[in-house]
């Protein structure tokens, strides 16, 4: 399946997109968020949290700890690799127990996974397209994520 691109015109719209996607998420799903600083990854993640019945005010970028966990409809494992210097640090936190666990894993700066990039995931790329505009591109890798994207487009 081809990728799907959606342009949002405000932070609220990006958050709503995350909330909408959350309806179709299941434990074990992996979302790999890529894009520059300020492109909307955390805003989108807060929307996902809201959709999973997690207080989105509690969701902050886990910049110093690489990962935060929240309990909702599914556990949410929120990774952020912004400060990562070496993919070995990912292995050191025992990331795979969470990434391939019972919850929904959302990974900011997923491009920094390097060789540890999960082979199947929904890649979500964020682009700044003007003051309050952002393009969000969804690229499925694997059958589960093609199905998820079909569901999302309904
Ligand atoms: P990232 O996690 O990718 O670094 P954030 O979500 O933390 O990005 O920040 C995005 C910034 O851009 C916020 O300050 C937000 O208010 C602003 N912004 C402006 N327009 C949008 C939009 N359409 N979608 C998301 N964020 C937007
Ligand atoms: Mg962020």
Image: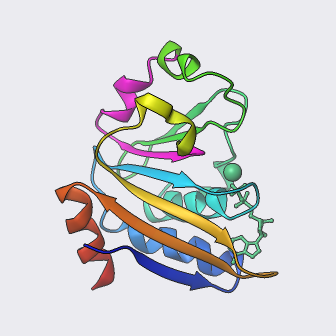
| Residue 115 belongs to the span the image colors magenta | no
Q: Which residues are magenta?
A: 93-109
Relative to 6, 61 lies left or right: right
Which quarter of the image is occupied by the N terminus?
A: bottom left
Query: In which image quadrant can residue 35 be found?
Result: bottom right
Q: Position of residue 118 (x, y in %)?
A: 35, 38
With 77 as the anchor, is 58 left or right in this view? right
Tell me residue 116's x, y (percent).
42, 29
Which residue is painted at 66% across and 26% down in the image?
65
Q: Relative to 152, say whether 96 is above or below.
A: above
Above or below for 116 versus 37 = above
For this rendering, which residue is in front, 115 or 20?
Answer: 115
Q: Give the quarter of the figure containing the C terminus.
A: bottom left
Q: x%, y% of residue 71?
A: 45, 42
* Towards the viewer: 27 or 84: 84
Query: Image quarter for residue 81?
Result: top right
Q: Is residue 50 above or below residue 152?
A: above
Q: Is residue 103 magenta?
A: yes
């Amino acid at each position: 399946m081809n990728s799907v691109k959606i342009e949002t015109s405000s932070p609220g719209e990006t958050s709503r997109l995350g909330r909408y996607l959350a309806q179709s998420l299941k434990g074990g799903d992996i979302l790999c968020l890529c894009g520059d600083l300020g492109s909307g990854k955390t805003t989108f993640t807060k929307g996902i949290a809201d959709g999973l019945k997690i207080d989105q005010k509690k969701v902050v970028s886990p910049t110093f700890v690489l990962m935060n966990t929240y309990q909702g409809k599914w556990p949410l494992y929120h990774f952020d690799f912004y400060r990562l210097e070496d993919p070995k640090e990912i292995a050191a936190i025992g990331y795979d127990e969470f990434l391939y666990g019972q919850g929904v894993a959302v990974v900011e700066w997923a491009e920094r996974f390097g060789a540890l990039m999960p082979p199947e995931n929904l890649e979500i790329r964020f682009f700044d397209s003007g003051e309050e505009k952002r393009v969000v591109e969804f690229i499925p890798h694997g059958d589960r994520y093609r199905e998820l994207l079909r569901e999302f487009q309904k």
